[in-house]
Amino acid sequence: QGAPRCPNDWVFVCASVGDCKAFLIEHDTLKVRDITLDNRGGQQFDADCGGRLGPVMENGGPDLRNLRTYCIRCQPGDLVVAVSDGVHDNLHPQMLSISPLALKMDFQTWEEAAKVVDVELVASKYRIQYLQNLISDIELTPGNVVSKIMDHCSKITLSSRDFMEKN
């Protein structure tokens, strides 16, 4: 055991081909890191997941254009949280009705901003801060973190789920 955040023999390694994201939560500081920061680079349009496993290409192979590998140092007690887009989309400022102006960007809409800045980088920074705030008042256990994130997603999607159930 060395000093806090001292390099050691522990690393987390993962690969991604699409919309899933992984975050590291440092147990001693509660700092959140977006392990898969650049995993949305292969998208051709908003609904494009950027990659798929299985025989989805014309040649019968997988869509690996967005295949990325990641490696991050971690310490005993840190948590890795892997989430699908169904979860991390609910941490995106646009999904939370946060305008670019509210984030001190000189754009009225996210579409305007996307023409000039890397909106995914802005969203990632926002997600990190949002997650840090979300977990700041809980005991850092896997169950507590998952419950807090899923409670948030449930609240955020309530009106759209109600609409879909009624219509």
Image (cartoon, rainbow, N blue to C red):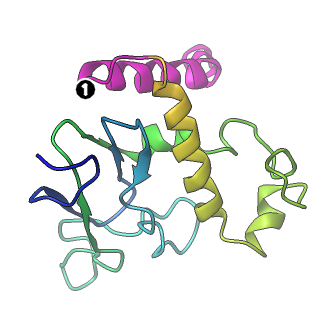
Question: For this rendering, which residue is in front, 86 or 145?
Answer: 145
Task: Decide whether residue 163 is among the magenta residues.
Answer: yes
Q: How many callouts does the rendering have?
A: 1
Which quadrant would residue 60 be assigned to in this image? Answer: bottom left
Foreground pick, 71 / 27: 27
- Up the image or down, 79 lies above or below 15; here it is above
Residue 30 falls in which quadrant of the image? top left
Instruction: Residue at 43%, 27% (x, y): give it.
Output: 149
- For disc 1, the neighbor class at 10 Å (few under 14, some 14 to 19, many from 20) is few
Q: Position of residue 141 (x, y in %)?
A: 26, 23
Q: Residue 128 location in percent, x, y?
A: 52, 46
The front one of 54 and 36 is 36
Judged from this view, the residue extending furthest toward the bottom is 59
Indicate yes or no whether the magenta region holds residue 14.
Answer: no
Magenta residues span 138-167
| Left or right: 61, with 154 as reference point | left
Horizontal arrangement in the rendering, residue 108 relative to residue 19 (left or right): right
In the rendering, at what x and y percent does residue 91 appear? 55, 39
Q: Main secondary structure of the magenta part?
A: helix
The residue located at (50%, 72%) in the rendering is 43
What amino acid type is highlighted by mark number 1? Pro
Residue hosting label 1: 142
Find numbered disc 1 in the image and state the secondary structure of the residue it sits on: helix
Q: Position of residue 83 (x, y in %)?
A: 35, 42
Question: Which image quarter is the C terminus in?
Answer: top right
